[in-house]
Amino acid sequence: MDNYAAKGMNVSCRTIDGEAFIFDQETRLLLQLDGVASFIWDQINGTKTIKEISDVCCQAFAGEAEEIQSSVQAFINDLEDKNVVVLSTKPFPEEVISAC
Amino acid sequence: MPVNNIQLSAITALGKRNILPSSVLVEVCYNCNENCVHCCLDNHSKPGLTLQQYHTLFDQMVEAGTFYVILTGGEPFIRPDFMEIVVAARKRRLSVTIFTNATLVTEQQITELRTLSIDEVHVSIYSANPSLHDSITGVPGSFAKSTATIRKMLAAGITVRIKCPLMNIAVNGIQGINDLAKGFGVNIQYSTVITARNDGDQHTHQCRLTPEQLQRVLVDHDVIAQGTEPIYFQENLDCIPCDTVFNGGAIDPDGNVYVCNQLRIIGGNILAQPLREIWKESPEFQRLREITLRDLKECSHCELFQHCTRCPGLAYLEDGDVLGCSSVAKKVAEARRRAGVYPTEAHIFSDPLARKEEML
């Protein structure tokens, strides 16, 4: 939960009718996110930790905080497995943050 | 939270369903250091938009739903600020492919392109015979420069593809081009049609393959894959002549917007109106999107239909009617029929919008 999350440098995202479509140039994979997942995706900016992203989600959505935190963690881990999100124990450099 | 994996081809379906310019070709200038005999440009003196205007254009593309951008010319590397244009596109996470003759690219630029994670660089090679290639470009030494750059790009880890429009004076050397590409370890993309110039001048047609050469090429599966069975039948009169009117896009060096660089009908100019608005609301583009096979009176009754890959842009440019027969498509279709082959699914009339939606 203390890791910082940033969008991968070879990933492009377009929001269409409220849903995010993420395209990974390297794997040629197109991912479709629903509204909640798109909200979390928007929070991934290289400056927030997963815990901080979870906190924002707890304020935005109704539900048990623990359950939301667990869902956010699982979701971001899934994105990391798909190589569209990178995690770091330290804040990301400016060029990564500005590209998020 | 579902994360649905979708095949890459769904980007085009997504663009079609939502009417998004998902893949846009940007001509950053018409200026060129080569003088190719078959060139489709009617002048080489358009320097393109300013760097700042390209920043604005790429912002508009992101807003409009663009994923891919193809940067081409003229020769894009003739612009001193071309790398800054590439950086501007990549900064917005647009996937970038570059079409170039590769004669002006410096080693420093190759390093930068690798760092920027460019998708692909497509290099035009017309023959594996250096003197024949140079006679087509009009520039002695161009083959040596282009191929040297390909080697350097590959060594740097950049994905390169050779583009080869087939011409009557070079078609006998196809094996040489195949061997060249194999030696590099790169894919090669042949095309069989030399188009008229953008102003309709057809003197470039003198470079086209003869009917016999065309037929020979069409049966060679190492050149262009052909089908052995027809894809669609004439009863599907609702099918769409070309998806590009929904999910393509092209911008010329003055900022004019087209559905495709082949179909020279202007929908608007990005200096006056955002791309998203032009793409969705241009009356010209909306009229093009309403066209179905039903409207192509000659096609729907043509005995060559199952062999044909008619391009609406070429029908308009070369024959003057976006709804009419394309004379060059007809010639290729006749050659296919003689050869007993059919177009592949990749280049034939596509499903109506409703059926495409079901793919997502």
Image: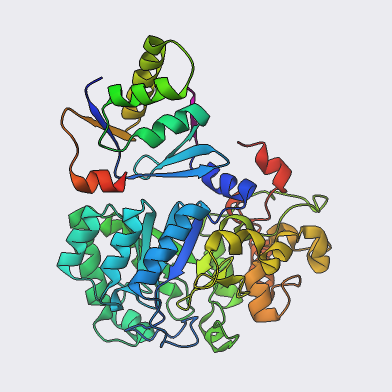
Q: Nearer the viewer, residue A78 or B203?
A: A78
Identified at 27% across, 31% down, the residue is A48
Q: Nearer the viewer, residue B148 or A57?
A: A57
Q: Nearer the viewer, residue B242 or B117?
A: B117
Magenta residues (range)? B1-6
Q: Is residue B249 left or right of residue A56?
A: right
Judging from the image, the colouring scheme is: rainbow
Give the answer, above or below, for where B343 lies relative to B203.
above
Q: Nearer the viewer, residue B86 or B106?
A: B86
Is residue A75 magenta-colored?
no
Q: Is residue B94 left or right of residue B273?
A: left
Q: Is residue B120 left or right of residue B276?
A: left
Can the viewer see residue B223 in this picture?
no
Q: Is residue A69 left or right of residue A91?
A: right
Q: Quadrant of the C terminus of chain B?
A: top right
Can the viewer see residue B315 in this picture?
yes
Give the answer, above or below, for where B184 lies relative to B297.
above
| x then y, percent, for residue B166 | 47, 72
| x then y, percent, for residue B81 | 27, 73
Residue furthest out toward the front: A59
Identified at 25% across, 64% down, the residue is B150
Q: How many marks?
A: 0
Q: Main secondary structure of the magenta part?
A: strand
| x then y, percent, for residue A37 | 46, 28
Give the answer, above or below, for where A39 lies relative to B83.
above
- The image quadrant that residue B170 belongs to is bottom left
| x then y, percent, for residue B163 | 40, 66
Identified at 15% across, 66% down, the residue is B108
Identified at 47% across, 77% down, the residue is B167
